Image (spheres, rainbow, N blue to C red):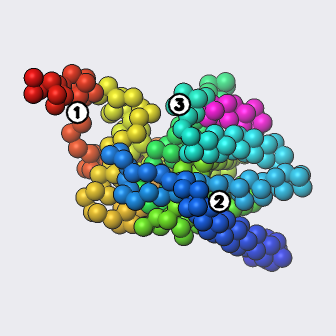
């Protein structure tokens, strides 16, 4: 026995994760060559975080093996309701992301797809009626399902927003996915743990190509699928009494702060939340330090205390609210440290352009 499971099963899990890593690595290489031949590039503009045209369809390289293994697991009868939730919703958001990466889709249609995927997933897993808050369980009824819906949709957008510099989303997925997998495994949820380890392994194969200087971007195909999967698994974990959903938010504290507060700040200044920009703190940090990998490593190091907080909360639920507050406060302070004055959209629109100034 190894950590409570048979050695044979442990070896099969390790072999499966290694195979997925190699598959994702090789498929990313193949997609890179194909994208270079077809000139499927993300061309830099004034809102980009990169300076060289780079293929942006790498998300399919880890989305495909991840979804393929889910199909196999579902066909073998493992947690069929969860499999349908992840497969149907994941295929939808990844497919819409692929189309958007290639030809661009209006924000309203992308948001509608994320909402449909969230409804689909919650219908299959049964929603979320209760929420654990420390040693107390809140009975939310249908309001809990509404909260779960918002969580899944926002996580889908959040990971997409944070995919702006080399390696950031992939590295965070590896760290948080691996640790959460261990926590779920020790909670007796071996299947949920395996799904997270599977996601981390597939992303790791892609990350080799996405590390600074990136040869491949994951695009919406990959980032939205990652956010959707984390959101659905957080609700599933809450439903079975494993790792509390709020502990997942503690781990994602930095991502939550940067995506949420930057978006709210832009909305308050009259900017549309779906417009591309470089106002996120990770963008500011990349400009300040002139290297994406320094920022990515810095975010990983800053995430370690939040991982420790989440682990502590999982073991000692009494500390959940203080830990959540510390995560949100610490993340907000770091977010504000890299923010700069923001110009109101009304001021920009109302300002005379160069032609009218000359007349």
The single residue placed furthest to the right in the displayed view is 76
Q: Residues within 10 Å of mark 2 (few under 14, many from 20)?
A: many
Alpha-carbon distance for marks 3 and 2?
A: 24 Å
Question: In this picture, which residue range is highlighted in magenta?
Answer: 113-125
Q: Which labelled disc corresponds to residue 218? A: none
Q: Secondary structure at mark 3?
A: loop
State the image coordinates of residue 219 (x, y, percent, origin top left).
54, 50
Q: From the viewer's perspective, is 31 left or right of 82?
A: left
Q: Is residue 47 visible in this depiction of the protein? A: yes
Which x, y percent locates residue 350? 21, 22
Sequence-first tag of 2 and 1: 2
Q: Nearer the viewer, residue 184 or 284?
A: 284
From the image, tell me which residue sits under label 3. 106
Query: Residue at 11% across / 26% down in the picture?
Result: 357
Q: Secondary structure at mark 1?
A: loop
On residue 61, which mark appears? Answer: 2
Residue occupying image coordinates x 32% and y 58%: 286
Report the disc number at residue 343.
Answer: 1
Q: Secondary structure at mark 2?
A: helix
**Mark 3 or mark 1, whichever is nearer to me:** 3
Left or right: 91 as drawn, with respect to 56: right
């Amino acid at each position: 026995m190894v950590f409570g499971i048979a050695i044979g099963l442990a070896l099969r899990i390790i072999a499966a994760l290694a195979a997925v890593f190699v598959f994702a690595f090789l498929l990313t290489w193949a997609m890179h060559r194909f994208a270079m031949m077809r000139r499927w590039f993300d061309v830099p503009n004034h809102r980009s975080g990169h300076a060289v045209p780079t293929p942006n369809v790498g998300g399919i390289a880890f989305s495909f093996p991840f979804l393929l293994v889910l199909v196999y697991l579902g066909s073998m009868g493992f947690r069929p309701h969860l499999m349908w939730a992840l497969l149907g919703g994941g295929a939808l958001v990844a497919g819409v992301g692929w189309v958007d990466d290639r030809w661009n889709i209006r924000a309203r249609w992308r948001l509608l797809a994320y909402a449909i995927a969230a409804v689909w997933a919650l219908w299959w897993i049964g929603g979320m009626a209760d929420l654990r808050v420390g040693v107390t369980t809140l009975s939310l009824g249908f309001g809990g399902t509404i909260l779960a819906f918002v969580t899944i949709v926002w996580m889908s957008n959040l990971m997409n927003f944070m995919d702006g510099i080399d390696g950031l989303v992939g590295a965070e997925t590896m760290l948080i996915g691996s640790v959460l997998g261990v926590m779920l495994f020790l909670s007796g949820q071996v299947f949920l743990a395996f799904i997270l380890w599977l996601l981390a392994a597939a992303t790791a194969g892609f990350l080799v190509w996405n590390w600074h200087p990136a040869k491949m971007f994951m695009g919406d195909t990959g980032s939205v699928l990652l956010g959707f999967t984390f959101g659905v698994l957080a609700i599933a974990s809450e439903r079975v009494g494993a790792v509390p959903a709020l502990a997942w938010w503690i781990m994602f504290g930095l991502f939550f702060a940067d995506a949420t507060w930057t978006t709210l700040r832009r909305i308050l200044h009259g900017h549309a939340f779906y417009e591309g920009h470089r106002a996120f703190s990770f963008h500011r940090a990349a400009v300040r330090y002139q290297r994406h990998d320094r920022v990515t490593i810095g975010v990983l190091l800053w995430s370690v205390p939040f991982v420790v907080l989440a682990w502590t909360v999982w073991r000692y639920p009494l500390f959940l609210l203080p830990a959540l507050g510390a995560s949100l406060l610490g993340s907000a302070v770091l977010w504000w440290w890299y923010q700069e004055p923001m110009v109101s959209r009304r001021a920009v629109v109302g300002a005379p352009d160069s032609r009218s100034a000359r007349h």
